[in-house]
Image (tube, rainbow, N blue to C red):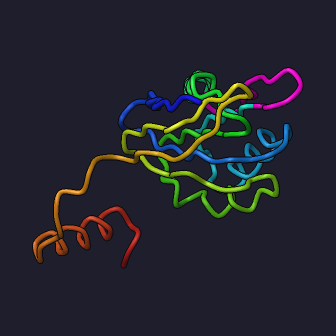
Amino acid sequence: MELLAVRIEKPDDINLILGQSHFIKTVEDLHEALAGSVPGLKFGIAFCESSGPALVRKSGTDAELTNLAAENCLRLGAGHCFLIFLRNAFPINVLAAVKAVPEVVGLHCATANPVEVVLVETAQGRAILGVVDGMKTKGIETDQDVAHRKEFLRKIGYKL
């Protein structure tokens, strides 16, 4: 058994959702869920099939994001994981739709931060053990930090 850390390669302004699913039709069902959740959403999806031909399945509305998701999934190579890249949208806009897809077993992260995926590789294949989402925490917020957080959330329209 070998432990690995694989960094997700993406532009800084792209959000991602990394999850686990269980069936070949996942990529199509995720596509439909995303397309129906935010009009004009730009996204790319890839899914690591873990039986039969064991291919990376892909779909999306943005060729760059779709290819980037597929390349990252191939590097992960972990059975039944999926990766969604979002352009000009936040995961919060689509998480309910993604979670509602019947094949989705769970989510590992939803972020724009740098992500490292911690994997284990055995003779059978690879599995995701967890993720490193962003950086190590530096401290506890001050009153000034609270004010900045509240101002930011209102500026981007998530709080009134």
The verdict on residue 44 being magenta is no
Residue 45 drawn at (x, y percent)? 66, 36
Is 52 colored magenta in this rendering?
yes
Residue placed at 89% from the left, 25% from the top? 52
At a point 40% along the width and 30% down the height, the residue shown is 11
Quarter that holds the N terminus:
top right
Q: Which residues are magenta?
A: 49-62
Determine the residue positioned at 51% across, 47% down: 130
Q: Nearer the viewer, residue 92 or 56?
A: 56
37 versus 30 height, above or below: below
Relative vertical location of residue 73 with respect to residue 37 in this rendering, above or below = above
Q: Is residue 92 visible?
A: yes
Q: Is residue 112 left or right of residue 58?
A: left
Q: Quadrant of residue 158?
A: bottom left
Q: Position of residue 86 (x, y in %)?
A: 53, 42
Residue placed furthest toward the right: 52
Which is the main secondary structure of the residues drawn in magenta?
loop
